[in-house]
Amino acid sequence: MTQVEIPARCLGVVIPVYNEEKTLHIIVQKVLSRPEVAELVMVNDCSRDGTWNTMQELAKTDDRIRIFTHDVNQGKGAALRTGFEHVNSDIVIIQDADLEYDPDEYPKLLTPILLNKADVVFGSRFLGSGMHRVLYYWHYLGNQFLTQLSNMFTNLNLTDMETCYKVFRKSVLKQIHIEENRFGFEPEITAKVAKMRVPIYEVSISYYGRTYEEGKKIGWRDGVRAIICILKYNLR
């Protein structure tokens, strides 16, 4: 990949948070250690553990942090919708609150946008070069099925539609209204950016997946909803 100088404080990070008290302080520290991060917007989706208290304490440590909370649990899509409404940076990335994705890979995700080649960048767990924890075969197969089904309707050749790491120019996000409250956000946003015909790039990323015992939340019902969302947002 072509090297490009990454400007300081050019990136807004949005983190949807639900029951991540154990890992939140670690990921926040990693995000804020990145010189390109200008702001961190976190949205608590009515967590039942000590997440909100942790967020309030973290917000006191750095003026780049802004926090918001939902009184009722709504889902990842709803938390992102709130986060997007409050982020101000010209470039915005989604970051999960667990430790599955590494903020040290922000520069490679930003590069296609900073080179003016892309308006949207997907970080693919399946392109190659990074480390990947070996986990669930059926999850992998399901992810591949959903990505290929999405590609059939969007006419994109993505390898990882369901990835967390998606980077957008703020000008793109401003034109999109997020309707899905849960994990249906992924096929919805993919369908909507595809219809905009903006340049989309993919870069390889590492993936440090976790088990259900470690807090993984997505389940088979979310897979069924993803199929519905692929049809809904591509055909209407």
Image (cartoon, grey):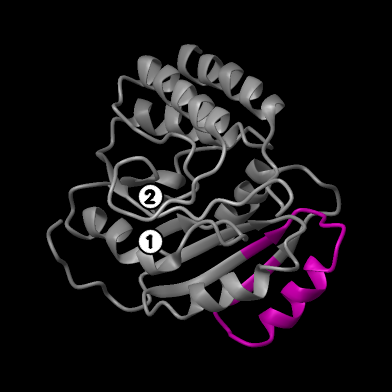
Quadrant position of residue 124: top left
Q: Give above or below for 56 relative to 153.
A: below
**Mark 2 or 1, nearer chain start:** 1
- Residue drawn where x is 36% and y is 63% of the image: 105
Judging depth in this view, the residue of 147 and 232 nearest the camera is 147
Q: How many marks?
A: 2
Seen in the image, is 99 located left or right of residue 189? right
Q: Give above or below for 73 relative to 5.
A: above
The stretch drawn in magenta includes residue 190: no
Give the structural element (helix, strand or loop) at label 2.
Answer: helix
Kindly identify the amino acid type of the residue bearing the numbered disc 1: Asp
Spot occupied by residue 102 in the image (x, y as percentages of width and height): 45, 63
Quadrant position of residue 77: top right
- Residue drawn where x is 62% and y is 25% of the image: 223
Q: Residue furthest bottom?
A: 61
Mark 1 Cα-neighbour bin, 10 Å: few <14, some 14–19, many ≥20? some
Q: Give above or below for 231 relative to 215.
A: above
Q: CA distance from mark 2 to mark 1?
A: 7 Å
Residue matched to label 1: 90
For the residues bearing labels 2 and 1, Cβ distance under 8 angstroms:
yes
Kindly identify the amino acid type of the residue bearing the numbered disc 2: Ser
- Residue drawn where x is 54% and y is 56% of the image: 100
Q: Which mark is residue 171?
A: 2
Q: Which residues are magenta?
A: 42-67
Spot occupied by residue 211 in the image (x, y as percentages of width and height): 65, 48
Seen in the image, is 220 located left or right of residue 187? right
Residue 225: tell me if it is visible: yes
Residue 188: tell me if it is visible: no
Judging depth in this view, the residue of 218 and 115 nearest the camera is 218
